[in-house]
């Protein structure tokens, strides 16, 4: 196999597919790669997807390129296993998604003009037709929410099922009653914490309800709940790193400080950020 780097997408993809086949070869391939199955790869696929998201959030082009490459390698890995098992190959995967995108975008490829507000309805109608065709022409038995994968991250799963329900009219008219619902759920959490012997299962349920309501607020405000929490977590991590640096500079260590001392450092970091902006 030539080490020359192709200069076109088709050549680069062919090089990657050839490398993958070599890695999976029982004759001189990599023992680890040969042992993998579709099931064993799923955890790595999730990790690579999150690492790609992290690189994008950090706006680091070189890292984005590398992480997207790792993610593409996962797809190629599944394609190679599928080909070995005579189930599908990379060509079948690429053609399947191309066919789906053309089919689901008649307003682009068939010049079937539609109002922008009707695009979501058109998308769902086409998906419903696809499900009916896949079931041999019989009405699709799946319930409305059955098409949402339960293995999604919790925030994303909540937002997707809420969005599905909203499309059939099961939704609050605006964000005001949703905020009321959040306050109601917070009150119920406080009620659970007020008892002498806390019922942890009930407490978990109330916290879950509150989180679900907050996701609903985010959706009504056209905010992606998962992205919002990710950015809040990154902000907290950055600020706490500065707290740790200040604590080390002033006291030699972060450990052993009282909460009031840590809070004072935290407020200073926030104040410094405000001045810098």
Image (cartoon, rainbow, N blue to C red):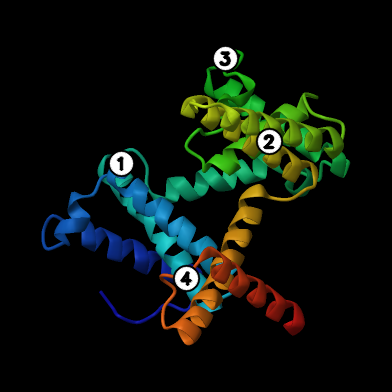
Q: Position of residue 269 (x, y in %)?
A: 64, 76
Foreground label between 4 and 1:
4
Front-most of 119 and 130?
119
Quarter of the image for residue 17 reads bottom left
How far apart, in angstroms, are the residues tagged by discs 3 and 4? 60 Å
**Mark drawn on residue 186:** 2
The secondary structure type at the circle numbered 3 is: loop
Vertical comparison of 16 with 273: above or below: above
* Residue holding disc 1: 39
For mark 4, what is the residue? 257
Distance CA(mark 4)–CA(mark 2): 31 Å
The residue positioned 60% from the left and 21% from the top of the image is 132
For the point 72% across and 38% down, the residue is 216
Q: Is residue 268 left or right of residue 250?
A: right
Label 3: how many residues lie within 10 Å, few (<14), some (14-19) or many (20+)?
few
Q: Secondary structure at mark 4?
A: loop
* Residue 100's disc number: none
Looking at the image, is mark 4 or mark 1 earlier in the sequence? Answer: 1
Which marked residue is nearer to the observer: mark 1 or mark 3?
1
**Residue at (65%, 25%) from the top-left corner?**
129
Q: Residue at x 86, y 37 (%)?
A: 176
Q: Position of residue 142 (x, y in %)?
A: 57, 19
Local crowd at mark 2 within 10 Å, few (<14), some, or many (≥20)?
some
Q: Given this view, does label 2 or label 3 mark the residue nearer the observer?
A: 2
Q: Does residue 277 appear left or right of residue 197 in this picture?
A: right
């Amino acid at each position: 196999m030539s080490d020359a780097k192709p200069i076109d997408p088709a050549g680069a993809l062919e090089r990657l597919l050839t490398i993958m086949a070599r890695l999976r070869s029982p004759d001189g391939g990599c023992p680890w790669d040969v042992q993998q199955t579709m099931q064993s790869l799923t955890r790595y696929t999730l990790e690579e997807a999150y690492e790609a998201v992290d690189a994008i959030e950090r706006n680091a082009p070189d890292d984005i390129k590398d992480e997207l490459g790792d993610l593409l390698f996962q797809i190629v890995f599944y394609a190679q296993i599928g080909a070995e098992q005579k189930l599908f190959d990379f060509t079948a995967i690429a053609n399947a998604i191309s066919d789906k995108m053309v089919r689901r975008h008649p307003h682009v490829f068939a010049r079937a003009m539609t109002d922008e507000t009707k695009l979501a309805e058109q998308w769902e109608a086409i998906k419903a037709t696809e499900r009916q065709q896949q079931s041999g022409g019989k009405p699709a038995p799946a319930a409305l929410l059955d098409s949402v994968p339960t293995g999604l991250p919790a925030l994303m799963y909540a937002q997707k099922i809420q969005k599905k329900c909203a499309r059939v009219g099961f939704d609050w008219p605006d964000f005001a009653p949703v905020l009321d619902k959040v306050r109601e759920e917070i009150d119920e959490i406080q009620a659970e914490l007020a008892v002498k012997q806390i019922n942890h299962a009930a407490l978990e349920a109330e916290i879950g309800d509150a989180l679900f309501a907050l996701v609903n607020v985010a959706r009504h405000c056209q905010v992606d709940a998962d992205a919002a929490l990710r950015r809040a977590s990154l902000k907290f991590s950055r600020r706490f790193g500065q707290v740790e640096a200040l604590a080390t500079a002033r006291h030699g260590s972060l450990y052993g400080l009282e909460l009031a001392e840590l809070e004072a450092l935290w407020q200073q970091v926030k104040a410094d950020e405000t001045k810098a902006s």
